[in-house]
Amino acid sequence: MAGDNTQFKANPVQAAILGARERRARRRLELVWRFETPLIQISVNVPGPDKLSGPWGNVLAEGVKAVERKLHENNLSTLHLEVGRSMAGHDAFMVVDSDSLALKRLCVAIESEHPLGRLLDIDVFDNRGAPISRRDLGARKRPCFICGEPAVLCRRSAAHDLSEVLAYMLNVAKPYFGADPTDPGPSSPDPGSSAATTDSGPPSTDPGPPATRPIDKAAPEVPSAALVGGSAAPTNLPRFLLSQPFGFINADNFSLAHDLAALAIQALIYEVSSFPAPGLVSPVSNGAHSDMNYFTFIDSASVLFKHFVYMAAIGYSDRSEEEIFSLIREAGKKAEQAMYRKTNGVNTHKGAIFVLGVCLAATAKVLHRKGAFKEIHLAIGSMARGLVAADLNLTALVKKTRPTHGELIYYHYNLPGVRAEAEAGFPIVFNLALPFYEAASDLPINDRLVHTLLEIMRHCQDTNVVYRQTPKALSKIQATATEAMALGGIRTSAGRSAINAMHDELVANNISPGGSADLLGATVFLSQAKLEYFPFQ
């Protein structure tokens, strides 16, 4: 077997093929994230710039049939099947809820035993999108079908002439189909044309109309977006609907959404890694918590990345602030469910999901309209406009059988908490914590975080504290934080001693200022986003 080492003379064609491969990889990632199960990708090994003329669509169809037979023999079924063709060639995606290593064994068997197996690449990816290799099974590398050497070496060195490879492939296909294998089959699509989809029977090699609807066997049906064909080069890239109601991830926001989400996860890890953090979980203390520790927070943060990507992608769009907020609240519910599954029911990041989710979406929205950093504050306020009145209606609260902690605090003490802070555009963060954090850049990162946390605690109407104690306890904590900062905070030995004493007192009284911790996370995120995307503002 030889690979695609032909040097293309026509740069537009090469660009079109590379673009199609990128879209194929992006679609694969989208499906893995959507179903959170392993995926099989089937493609045909056609070297050279023309990957569509010939029997290769029929070869792919036989490959899909072979995989489906293997799955059926092992009592496995396909959750989602999607077949397509582009300048990168014919390919198919099959989502299967099974062990990825077991799937890889089945696929290796097909590649080795099926008459057309040597013409096919049948790759398996786990539920995180990581490829499963033959090495993971202890199997030897796949041999080249021309010389028997490892195929990867032949690909890298372009060891075999294009015509030699194509002649071999046609000679393999001809006896299988019993017809002239040089028949070009369906006409070639424009670069970036759509995938055809089906839920049963042999896959179609006809790309069909520009927009198709994949049919899922075990998931809510979600319409796929149109993959619009371009001209010589793939200038129109696809938009992928992840799952309702998360909105679209497309070529414009894909990279940005991931980068912003990474900053949000960084902020979560920074926050929980700093100490002494009065009453809070840190690497050296569980704080005022008996049901969680530092590693519980790391576990929780690890599953939030995908959901933060969704929220950033929702923000990076033409949608109104009101629509964005509605969508990210739904996305936030999914994030909370993932958090609880990971932590076995422990609430580690519920508040942070809300605070960082709003900051993510607002930052993405401002970047989309090429605005200034200061506009993020205004975008947050616009997104959350009317939130207190909508969520904290006393008449409605009286009738609720399971009110949230925030709703209970509002009902008993008339404290609107983080909802009011969001509706005002997080003034504690933008007007106080962020300038303070930036001014403390001379400190080591741990001390900088603790110093800023204490400054936030001086001013935050932390309903986490009120829920565990009373408004009077919150006032006392604010006063204690003010005293510690008056002694120099983390910068002096007296201030550090006061912070340590404060930590011991909060732990003894079962008080955890989680609301302040969430605002610290937002501060870190916005500081990093400012450095990355608004460096001169």
Image (tube, helix red, strand yellow):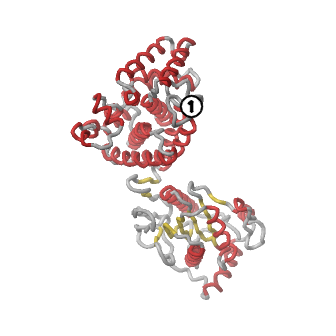
The answer to whether residue 116 is above or below residue 276 is below
Q: Secondary structure at mark 1?
A: helix
User: Which residue type does callout 1 highlight?
Assistant: Ser
Percent x, y of residue 237: 46, 58
Q: From the viewer's perspective, is 150 left or right of 366? A: right
Left or right of 354? Residue 287 is right
| Above or below for 431 versus 4 | above
Residue 405 occupies quadrant: top left
Name the spot of residue 153 as percent of width and height, x first: 75, 62
Where is residue 374 drawn, in percent x and y? 38, 31
Q: Is residue 316 visible?
A: no
* 112 left or right of 55 in image: right
Residue at the farthest left position: 395
Of residues 348 and 435, the one drawn nearer to the viewer in this rendering: 348
- Residue appearing at x 74%, y 70% in the figure: 144
- Crowding near the residue tagged with mark 1, few <14, some 14–19, many ≥20 C-alpha atoms within 10 Å: some
**Is residue 136 visible from the viewing direction of this image?**
yes
Q: Return the x and y of residue 115 as percentages of the image width and height.
A: 67, 80
To which residue does mark 1 refer?
273
Residue 522, above or below 130: above
Quadrant of the snapshot with the C terminus: top left
Residue at coordinates 56% horizontally, 13% vertically from top-left? Answer: 492
Q: Nearer the viewer, residue 218 or 181?
A: 218
**Residue 46 position (above or below residue 400):** below
| Residue 455 image-quadrant placement | top left
The residue shown at (44%, 23%) is 435
Q: Nearer the viewer, residue 103 or 108?
A: 103
